Amino acid sequence: MEKVKEVLKRFGNSKDNLIQVMLELQNISGTNSLPHEWVEFVAAELDMPLSRVYSVITFYAMFGTEPRGKYVVEVCKSAPCHVTGAGSLLSMLEKELKVKPGQTTEDGVFTLIQSSCFGACDISPAVKIGEKVYGNLTPQKLNEIVNSYREGRHNG
């Protein structure tokens, strides 16, 4: 719990910083997710009901409560992305990664999720891998990007 205490101290043990605290904890967890014990500890330290903390972290696609892959691949499901072909990108990813949304690849490299808008409507259809957004995608372009992550030659 020392890591958790350190992060809370850095953010001033303030309820207003819950999202930033949880993002930081997820980044240092080693599982790209939020362990239940950590969530319980944060709730107690911030004097918040555990259900309230979980309602926040389950609302946002960026948080995981189960271990996830090294890279979270988010396919935007907003209307602009849907209209411009996000469905074909999702289908390609399901075939290429051999997983459905919410699942992690056997090698633990990718977790595929569908998420709400992440602000890339002007370059739809868009996919976010980790913190990097890729837009104006075709299944072929996306396949090349995914392979670059697999081979360690991505620049994101």
Image (cartoon, helix red, strand yellow):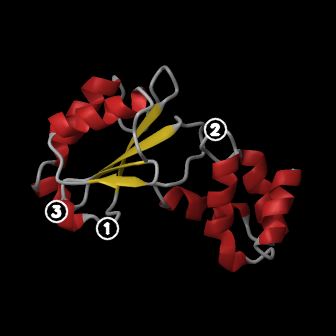
Check disc 1 and report the residue beneath it: 119
Q: Is residue 37 left or right of residue 81?
A: right
Q: Earlier in the sequence, mark 1 or mark 3?
A: 3
Count how many numbered circles sit on residues in the image: 3
Q: Earlier in the sequence, mark 1 or mark 2?
A: 2
| Label number found at residue 31 | 2
Q: Residue at x 50, y 21 (%)?
A: 107
Q: Is residue 8 above or below residue 128?
A: below
Q: Residue at x 46, y 48 (%)?
A: 130
Q: Is residue 135 something one can see in this rendering?
A: yes
Label 3 CA crowd tier, 10 Å (few <14, some 14–19, many 20+): some
Q: Is residue 148 left or right of residue 4?
A: left
Check disc 3 and report the residue beneath it: 80
| Label number found at residue 22 | none
The kind of residue tagged 2 is Thr
Closer to the camera, 106 or 120?
A: 120
The kind of residue tagged 3 is Pro
Q: Is residue 128 left or right of residue 85?
A: right
Q: Which percent across, then down, holds residue 154?
A: 40, 39
